[in-house]
Amino acid sequence: MLDIKFIRENADKIKEAIKNKNIDLDLDGLLETDGERVRALQYIEELNAEKNVLNDLIQKSQGDERKTLIEQGKAVKEKMAIAEPEYLEIKKHFDDLMVKVPVIPAEDVPVGKSEKENVEIYTWGEIPKFDFEIKDHIQLGKDLDILDLERGAKVSGYRGYYVKNEGVGLMMGFMMYALQKMISKGYSPMIVPTLVKEFPLFGSGYFKGKEYNPEIDEIYQVASSDKEADGEISRDKKFLVGTAEPSLLAYHSGEVLKEEDLPMKLCGYSQCYRSEIGSYGKDTKGLYRVHEFMKVEQVILSKANIEESDALQQEMVGISKEMHEELGLPYRQLKICTGDMSAGKYKMFDIEAWIPSRNGYGETGSASNFLDWQSRRLNVKYVDKNGKKKYVYMLNNTALASPRTFISIIENYQQADGSVLIPEVLKKYMPEGMEKISRK
């Protein structure tokens, strides 16, 4: 969410961002609504001031004068009874429009309408060449008895799965590898809540609008009610997070930090849940697109300095690239175009690992810089050296996520005899230093 003064002063640039990000928003209509909101609020303030003056006069008056003043007070109350609901209706409309206002993307962000216009800026590793007929991760998982999709669907439904036996060691191994990598890079680790209230999801931008919309938001809402400490039924709606990012960003919500504590680097391990309603019919087989998985996420809260936040974003991407290289996974880095970025993003990069069965790359990570768009929603500020309060800048990036990393490893490391080699950096996490997973 942006400051309304900034929006007015940069209307032309924001209109261009609205167009380039494919956002359905009439900025002139928003600014007109803001004018109505300000006028309605001023009118209420004037009525309140008049009411206060009348109350003071009533206390000091008697007889007919007092009766007259009381009648005037009643008239003011009647006006207030009309004005306040009108103001609330205008403000609700204003707020609904404000949450759609996009961040102006960086000048070097490619302008494009969709993911097809993202730009490849870096590649690493040689695409493996196999002298045998390769298997996809579904067949490998079944042959090696490390993946059971049929029983997963039976128990969990569409996109359900079981990871089994040595597959558990492999998957938990690269989760621990990612967590230890983040710690070695100076990120404070957390196991975060995955059941959260509305505000972390709205604040981080996981709702398209001001409130949860099950038709478009790929978030699961928990249907059962909760109880507060006093035993009363909670009025808070609860949701399952799709990543540790909202929980990490909301950790300091409503707080004022110290400049000397920035940048603040956090990493979170969590189970993740996504309804994937916007991807109906896509990647319906295997682990490529599932409803629940594990992930290690990295988050940075930085000073309100674009150059510094740019450098920190590159640092985050660099860690992801380092992990892909140490895992021996060929990958490419994409600079994401305007049409494939959400409203709050200033700049975004994706990492995609090579997946042999797709004969192409698949997204395994994404790094985004939101500037102060999220921190304004979550109300996270810091005091600079001049004593001025500013909103922090917020950045996030995937360290490693479980499904596609698992797919890429077992498919790239498959052997002619049907076995799968274990990447060197993961052997220490496997039972007895296992070097490969073989058929029983």
Image (spheres, rainbow, N blue to C red):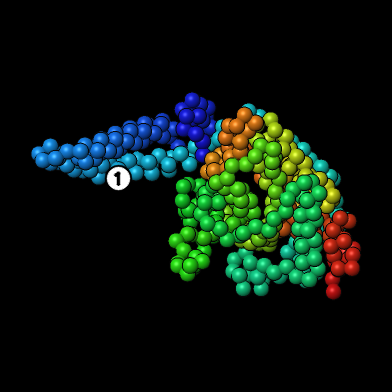
Whole-percent x and y of residue 378?
55, 45
Residue at 69%, 41% in the rendered image? 261
Q: Residues within 10 Å of mark 1 (few under 14, many from 20)?
A: few
Residue at 48%, 41% in the rendered image? 99
Whole-percent x and y of residue 75?
18, 40
Relative height, residue 317 to residue 356 (above, below): above
What is the total number of numbered labels drawn onto the structure image? 1
Instruction: Give the camera-side residue of 400 and 266.
Output: 266
In the displayed image of the protein, which residue is found farthest to the left? 64
Whole-percent x and y of residue 119?
69, 36
For residue 359, side relative to residue 2 (left or right): right
For residue 358, say whether it is visible: no
Relative height, residue 358 to residue 138 (above, below): above
The quadrant holding residue 439 is bottom right
Q: Quadrant of the C terminus?
A: bottom right
Residue at 69%, 69% in the rendered image? 162
For residue 436, say whether it is visible: yes
Q: Amino acid at mark 1?
A: Pro
Relative height, residue 379 to residue 147 (above, below): above
For residue 257, side relative to residue 170 (left or right): left
SS category of the residue bearing label 1: helix
Instruction: Give the camera-side residue of 94 and 81.
Output: 81
Q: Which residue is mark 1?
A: 85
Residue at 47%, 59% in the rendered image? 236
For residue 429, side relative to residue 67 (left or right): right
Whole-percent x and y of residue 260?
69, 38
For residue 320, side relative to residue 347 (left or right): right
